[in-house]
Image (spheres, grey):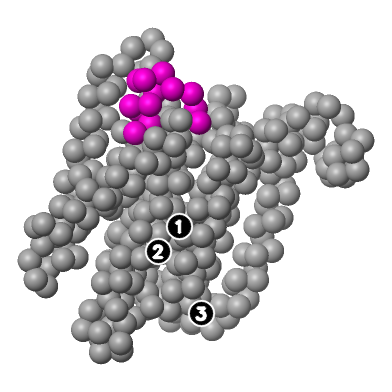
Amino acid sequence: MEKAAILRQNRVKRNPRFVFALLCTALPMLMLLSMLWGRYPASLADLFSLFSGTADAIVSHVITDIRLPRIAAAVVVGVALSAAGSAYQGVFRNPMVSPDLLGASAGAGFGASLAILWGLPTFWVQQISFVFGLAAVAVTGALSALASARGSRTLVLILSGMVVAALFNAMISLAKYTADPYSQLPEITFWLMGGLSGITMSRLGATLIPFAINLLVLLLIRWRINVLSLGEEEALSLGVNVRLIRAVVVVCATMLTSLAISLCGQVGWVGLVVPHIARMLTGANYKRLLPVTALLGGIFLLVVDNISRNLMVMEIPLGILTAMIGAPLFVFLLLRGKRGWL
């Protein structure tokens, strides 16, 4: 049985183009099905009438103003978190690394909590969350630069990220403690649990350009992530500027993480679990791994969001579902790792 499983895995790894083509087909099909699936029923005829301009006003509102922004946001967030997690794992040479390693998630959460305490509208909650996510990683980098000894920069950077994340999580708790328990506290709590129910095209549109730029940069330099994953000495011997490439990857992955969190709140496990599944399908070569991880992340979060909005009468927060699905899945992958799947 074990030999058969390894042979099946090797056959998949020899066909990365097939896996990529399959995911490229599955994602738009799933987006189409998500347009039709919901509490208000819709059909293909409704979609065709929407394109032709003859759709009913209610159908047009449900699909164009509610489902389309939410579906697009789920794909964007899933792609961003998965690509960031995969890039972090390659740069730090550690498969247990996730996008919130350097404190971006905690910083963004505190920024959003602060904006809610100030009574700012949703647009500014998103912007301040994004800025504080970047600021947290900047503090991590500055602390690491001050504290790192020669030859231990990566370890000090990780430890600095843990310290900064703990500090911002404490400030989130302080913000919740001082918030109005009848209005602000519930809003902060629901934001931190994650969700896409309030997404609009204007909110999503503000993130698309920086999202596309940072994702494109990671895709263009993904072969260098392969070199970094071999170790600093090997990378230097191959003529790669380790500090520059690591800085570029960390900045782009941090931007993607902060953008995702500012859109939907704190959603965990996506950037940790999805890269492992992609690695199982395509191997560890980042030329294939990063595009497959991005597509798989969009599919994963879109499926989870469909479950979130349709499983129960009340919508389940996205962060709860990703943890409930991601944690057992990760345990399964760890157990399969003994047979060469990770």
What residue is pinned by disc 2?
86
Gap in angstroms between the C-alphas marked 1 and 2: 6 Å
Residue 52: % across, % down:
91, 43
Name the dominant secondary structure of the magenta segment: helix
Residue at image x 49%, y 81%? 10
> In the picture shown, does residue 263 fall above or below 281?
above
Residue at image x 40%, y 72%? 341
Q: Is residue 2 magenta?
A: no
Please tell me which of labels 3 and 1 falls first in the chain.
3
Write down the quadrant of residue 229 in the picture. bottom left
Residue at image x 19%, y 40%? 166
The stretch in magenta equals 111-123
Please tell me which of labels 2 and 3 falls first in the chain.
3
Tell me if label 1 and label 2 are in contact, CB under 8 Å. yes
Residue 139: % across, % down:
22, 48
Residue at image x 66%, y 60%? 26
The three-letter code of the residue at mark 2 reads Ser
Residue 97: % across, % down:
30, 59
> In the picture shown, does residue 181 fall above or below 37?
above
Using the image, tell me which numbered label, if any, was put on residue 13.
3
Q: Residues within 10 Å of mark 1 (few under 14, many from 20)?
A: many
Gap in angstroms between the C-alphas marked 2 and 3: 17 Å
- Residue 253 showing in the rendered view: yes
Q: Nearer the viewer, mark 3 or mark 1?
A: 1
The three-letter code of the residue at mark 1 reads Ser
Which secondary structure, mark 2? helix
Which secondary structure, mark 3? helix
Q: Nearer the viewer, mark 2 or mark 3?
A: 2
What residue is pinned by disc 1?
82
